[in-house]
Image: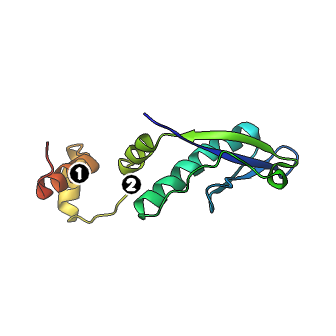
Amino acid sequence: MKGLTYLAVLEPSGEKSYSLYFPDMPGCYSDGKNLEDALKNAKDALELHYYGMVKDGEEVPKSTGKVSKEDAEGCIVCPVTIYPDVVVEKYNNKKVKTNCTLPAWLKEIAENNHINYSQVLEAAIKQKLGLNQ
């Protein structure tokens, strides 16, 4: 499995907090209340930004592996690696909340029988679309 590595620039933005960005991934920003939090958020931000670009059919910029002297001055520069296949799988299978309506009598019976609405709805939609495996 091949990873993509981009350099993150973490700028001190308070006593212990940091704001961060990726010079080679325009529009990808985050922050953290401390260094550990900023590094975790950097990975999350890069994954989500990457996924959004792929989902929108945009070309993902290549990493140069370099940061300009101006960008690095007074900052922490660190590599952040993501694994594209894992990222796409993660976000494609992320559970999302959706709202649906039922007749009151059916909802009451379902709840009395401990029906898991999410499981039933997912199975029914898969069946309707012919996606059952």
Q: How many numbered circles does the render carry? A: 2
Q: Is residue 59 above or below residue 63?
A: below
Please state which amino acid type lies under the numbered disc 1: Glu
- Other-residue count near label 2 (Cα within 10 Å), few / some / many at <14 / 14–19 / ≥20: few
N-terminal-most mark, 1 or 2: 2
Please name the residue that numbered disc 2 is placed on: 96
Question: Please, which residue is most extreme toward the top here?
Answer: 1
Q: Residue 46's mark?
A: none
The image quadrant of residue 5 is top right
Q: Residue 50 versus residue 60: which sits nearer the camera?
A: 60
Image spot of residue 86 (x, y percent): 42, 40
Q: Is residue 89 left or right of residue 26?
A: left
Q: Is residue 115 left or right of residue 128?
A: right
Image spot of residue 58 (x, y percent): 46, 64
Residue at image coords 41%, 60%: 55
Image spot of residue 6 (x, y percent): 62, 45
The reply to whether callout 1 and callout 2 are in contact (CB within 8 Å) is: no
Residue at image coords 88%, 47%: 74
Q: Residue 98 versus residue 105: which sits nearer the camera?
A: 98
Secondary structure state at the residue bearing disc 2: loop
Q: Residue 11 versus residue 68: which sits nearer the camera?
A: 68
Residue at image coords 22%, 63%: 104
Please state which amino acid type lies under the numbered disc 2: Val
Secondary structure state at the residue bearing disc 1: helix
Image spot of residue 16 (x, y percent): 84, 43
Residue at image coords 18%, 61%: 105
Q: Residue 51 versus residue 65: which sits nearer the camera?
A: 65
Q: Residue 122's mark?
A: 1
Q: CA distance from mark 1 to mark 2?
A: 11 Å
